[in-house]
Amino acid sequence: MRSYGLTGMKDYIRKSIGLGDTFASLVRGRADLFEIITTPAFGLTVFRIKSPKSGTTMVEADNGVLVAQPDEAANELTKEVYELVNSRGEIFITSTVACGVYAIRVVSTNPAAEEKYVKRAFEILVETAEEIIKRG
């Protein structure tokens, strides 16, 4: 609060969530390549790379929500993309394993974050995923 003040803090939160929404929309726009595995929230998008070998492995739960199912081919592909992106050093992302699903986490809650950086991060992920799939 000392750094931003109440109004500044509200603006910062709105900006961060808006950038997260932008990134999630970009991911949804490439449903041929990515699957969002949890509902994006507070600037965080959690997704995996779709395996061309498996197709989609999302199933509808009893409450009507789509749930990602474990898929070894998608897990390996996602892990390879994650490791290659981080090894190249232009952006840094984190990963997680939830219920046997390996996923990449991208969060936009950084004071220096801007839309152009979020879009560039997405481009890097697309380029890397396509590169690895093409090799595959």
Image (tube, rainbow, N blue to C red):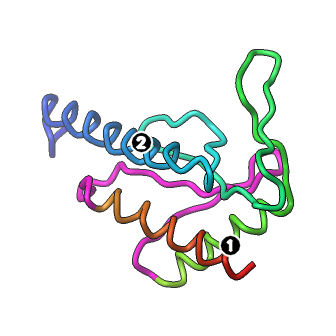
Displayed quadrant of residue 66: top right
Residue depicted at x 35% and y 37%? 17
Of 83 and 109, the residue lying toward us: 83
Q: How many neighbours does mark 2 have within 10 angstroms: few (below 14), some (14-19), or many (20 or more)?
A: many
Tell me the mark number nearer the camera, choosing from 1 and 2. 1
- For marks 1 and 2, give the CA distance: 27 Å
- Where does the image place residue 51, in percent across and percent down from the top left? 75, 60
Q: Is residue 64 shown in magenta?
A: no
In this view, 116 is above or below 64: below
- Which residue is under mark 2? 43
Instruction: Give the residue type at disc 2.
Output: Gly
The magenta-colored residue range is 89-116
Q: Quadrant of the C terminus?
A: bottom right
- Which residue is under mark 1? 133
Q: Quadrant of the N terminus?
A: top left
Q: Secondary structure at mark 1?
A: helix
Displayed quadrant of residue 135: bottom right
Displayed quadrant of residue 96: bottom right
- Where does the image place residue 3, in percent across and percent down from the top left? 15, 46
Q: Secondary structure at mark 2?
A: loop
In this view, 128 is above or below 59: below
In this view, 93 is above or below 39: below
- Where does the image place residue 122, in percent across and percent down from the top left? 43, 60
Q: Is residue 115 shown in magenta?
A: yes
Q: Is residue 24 left or right of residue 57?
A: left
Instruction: Give the residue type at disc 1.
Output: Ile
Residue depicted at x 14% and y 36%? 8
Q: How many neighbours does mark 1 have within 10 angstroms: few (below 14), some (14-19), or many (20 or more)?
A: some
Marked residue nearer the N-terminal end (1 or 2): 2
Of 112 and 7, the residue lying toward us: 112
Tell me how many marks there are: 2
